[in-house]
Image: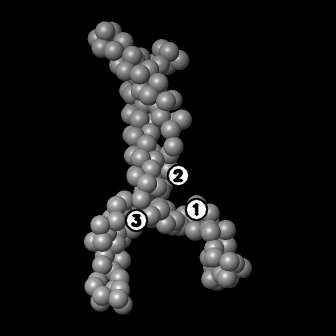
Amino acid sequence: MTDRIDQIIEKLQQLKEIRQQLVDEPMSPPGAWIHQYEVQKQYKKDGQVYWYVYAKWQANEPIFKRNPKQRLKGIVKRGKNPEYTCHQHIGRVGSSTGLSTDPQVEEAYQEWANRKRLDAIDIAIEEIENALKIVMPEKNDEA
């Protein structure tokens, strides 16, 4: 049993090291996710309808800095936060025209993956520490 506990403590230390490395990586804000949506546009030249898939950051609370157009500065709908919004456009994911994914979209997905990984590691560390407190209450400070 002691060997198994020692292995768990060692894994806990490894998780904490991984977490420390991950904290230094670019990361999405807590509680934010990426939403993809499709837009169709008909061009007047050839009458063709093309589709584009875009990505945007989304959150339940206004956490993204607004970037209003010059002509709209100072115009804010009633009840809206004048400085922050719940979403932020990232860029194009793809299109029927053959345009590729914008680099900032790929970066955003990496930031989101880092956030999800950090959240999972935090939950795992907390669960392991709680289990160790139950198994060895006199050695709480070592874990």
For mark 1, what is the residue?
Answer: 64
Q: Is residue 92 above or below residue 28?
A: below
For mark 2, what is the residue?
Answer: 29
Which label was assigned to residue 15? Answer: none
Residue 119, x across and y down, in percent = 43, 42
Residue 83 located left or right of residue 105 = right
Q: Secondary structure at mark 1?
A: strand
Name the front one of labels 1 and 3.
3
Determine the CA span between mark 3 and mark 2.
20 Å
Of labels 2 and 1, earlier in sequence is: 2
Q: Amino acid at mark 3?
A: Arg
Q: Amino acid at mark 1?
A: Phe
Task: Check the picture and name the quadrant holding the N terminus.
Answer: top left
Residue drawn where x is 54% and y is 64% of the image: 61
Q: Secondary structure at mark 3?
A: strand
Determine the CA span between mark 1 and mark 3.
19 Å
Residue 129 located left or right of residue 100 = right
Q: Are marks 2 and 1 in contact (CB under 8 Å)?
A: yes
